[in-house]
Image: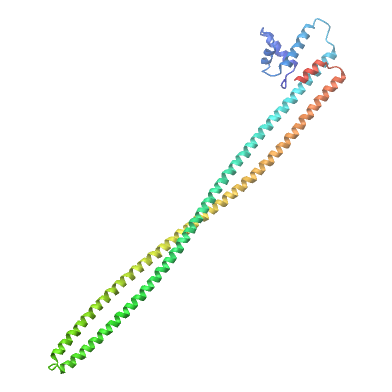
Amino acid sequence: MARGGINKALVQKARQAILARGEHPSIDAVRVELGNTGSKTTIHRYLKELEEAEQGRGAAPVPLSSQLANLVAHLADQLQEEAQAAVAQEREQLAHERRDYLERIRQAESRSQQLETQCAGLIEQLQGAQQTLEQEQQQRQQAAVENARLLQANRDQEARLEDREGQVRSLEEKHQHARDALEHYRQASKEQREQEQRRHEAQVQQLQLELRQLQQALMVKQDELTQLNRDNAHLLTEARQLQKDQHAQQQLLAQKNQVLEAAQAALSGAQCSNEALEQRCSSLQNDVAQLREAASIQAQQAQSLQERLIEATTQLKLLGHVPLANVDGANDT
């Protein structure tokens, strides 16, 4: 198939240039001279016509009808070549645009997949943050239960301490009563000192022994009271530490809530971006549909040109001026 712009005049000019250099005007040489354009069949036909024309210059002149037929055949060949070149160029441009839009669609789909992956990662982070939040809430509930237990234990210790203090007060009252009784006994014994000296000494020793026992019991009770005070102070310290831990857990929970809100905001942004990409993808698909319609219209135009060319060739055949060999060569090109 010859390309657009190849005609008999160009072949003749290339042949003359080759002859001027003293070379043989073969088909390949002429095609190289023309810039590697045109089919070898067309070049061969033109060279044959030029050689026949040179051989017939000394003979009778060529009829005008033959020249007109040759000119019409050349014009038909050139018209067909130009139409085919235009159709090929339009098809190549359409294929290039189609590849471009397909590449854009592929990039959009790749971006959409990346955003879906990021969205899935954010959802996993959100789920992890929710699980961490649930764990923190469980720990907080456990800490509240432990705090309530310690407060109840503190109240129990205070009740026990009050009970021990009541016991100490009762012992002190008994001790005071014993002292009062001893003082009363001393007053009474002064009157009977001479008669009951030995019995009085025995009673005094007995009372002193009881007094020492009471004092020892009082010291033991005071030691127990001191230990209870220490236990109470230790429980108060633990309660304060638990309150500090609870406050720290509350701060950590607030931080987790902030992280969760940030993750939710990022997830909303990713969803908006995904929706925008989906809209862009839909727009690109519409553009591809429009290009397909344009390609269909151009194909119809090319078909119309082909039909016009066939119609022109048919008319030339009906006129009876176009040689059958020339028409067959035009169809080959």
- In this rendering, the answer to whether 280 lies above or below 24 is below
* Left or right position of 175 against 114: left
What residue do we see at 33% from left, 68% from top?
A: 234
> Compared to 135, does 149 lie above or below?
below
At horizontal 40% and vertical 70% (from top left) the residue drawn is: 151
Q: How many marks?
A: 0
Residue 83 place in picture, x, y as percent: 75, 26
Side of 167 relative to 286 (left or right) = left
Q: Which of 122 and 255 is in front in this view?
A: 122
- Specify the quadrant of the image occupied by residue 144: bottom left
Residue 107 image-quadrant placement: top right
Residue at (78%, 28%) from the top-left corner?
A: 305
Task: Residue at 35% x, 68% y: name it.
Answer: 235
Residue 67 in picture, x, y percent from top left: 82, 14
The image position of residue 28, as x and y in percent, is 68, 13
Where does the image place residue 328, in percent across and percent down from the top left?
79, 18
Of the 4 image quadrants, the one containing the N terminus is top right
* Residue 88 in the figure: left or right of residue 241: right
Q: Please determine whether, in this image, residue 194 is positioned above or below residue 323.
A: below
What colouring does the structure picture have?
A: rainbow
**Foreground pick, 199 / 280:** 199
Given residues 325 and 37, the one toward you in this image is: 325
Relative to residue 230, is residue 287 depicted above or below?
A: above
Query: Which residue is at the far right?
Result: 319
Q: Residue furthest top?
A: 58
Name the quadrant of the C terminus: top right
